[in-house]
Image (tube, grey):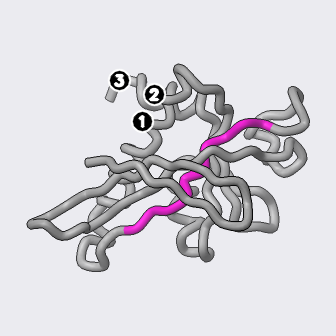
Amino acid sequence: MAARTSCSGNRTPYRSNLGVGRSKGTVVGYYALAAHKVARESVPPAGGRGGPSESFAVLLARLALSGSLRGQGYGAVLVADALARVVEATQTVAARLVVVDALHERVAIFYESLGFRRVPDSLLLVQKVADIEAALRAPE
């Protein structure tokens, strides 16, 4: 199930798509996607060099899962759904990367296990949309 949200604060307002999973009327997991941009020098070498000084990206802004469901693979399912939506959206709107700003080391390791590459000396991770699209198209 998806919902649209709008947020505004001291900075430019943005919109994000929010994916929500429900079980017996209770929200058990969600994620949010938002427009973003990344400076070229902050992208790991495998993330791509050359091109403009900034790349358009999609920020996986939030990802949460009920504690009772953690460790069962549902977090990876939520990320896969979010990434599929990103690939679909980039058929219309340009974005080169998906960005995650991990809260702590354990979360960064989770995203690395899903193919994201860490920006050195940080908890910021990126993955090229082209790589995500290729993985989604690959036969199982």
The residue identified by callout 2 is 88
User: What amino acid type should be assigned to the residue bearing mark 2?
Assistant: Glu
The Cα atoms of the two marked residues, 1 and 3, are separated by 15 Å
The part of the image, by quadrant, that contains residue 70 is: bottom left
Disc 2 is placed on an element classified as helix
* On-image quarter of the C terminus: top left
Q: Measured from the top left, where is residue 5 in percent x and y? A: 45, 54
The Cα atoms of the two marked residues, 2 and 3, are separated by 18 Å
User: What amino acid type should be assigned to the residue bearing mark 3?
Assistant: Pro
Residue pictured at 47% horizontal, 31% vertical: 135
Residue sitting farthest toward the left: 24
> Is residue 61 shown in magenta?
yes
- Which is in the foreground here, disc 1 or disc 3? 1
Check the image and report above or below for 77 versus 51.
below
Q: Measured from the top left, where is residue 114 in percent x and y? A: 50, 51
Badge 3 density bin: few <14, some 14–19, many ≥20, Cα 10 Å: few
The residue identified by callout 1 is 84
Q: Is residue 76 left or right of residue 57?
A: left
The part of the image, by quadrant, that contains residue 30 is: bottom left
The residue identified by callout 3 is 139
Q: What number is the disc on residue 16?
A: none
Disc 3 is placed on an element classified as loop
Check the image and report above or below for 92 versus 121.
above
Badge 2 density bin: few <14, some 14–19, many ≥20, Cα 10 Å: few
Q: Which residues are magenta?
A: 55-64
Tell me, yes or no, whether the two marked residues, 1 and 2, touch with CB atoms within 8 Å.
yes
User: What amino acid type should be assigned to the residue bearing mark 1?
Assistant: Ala
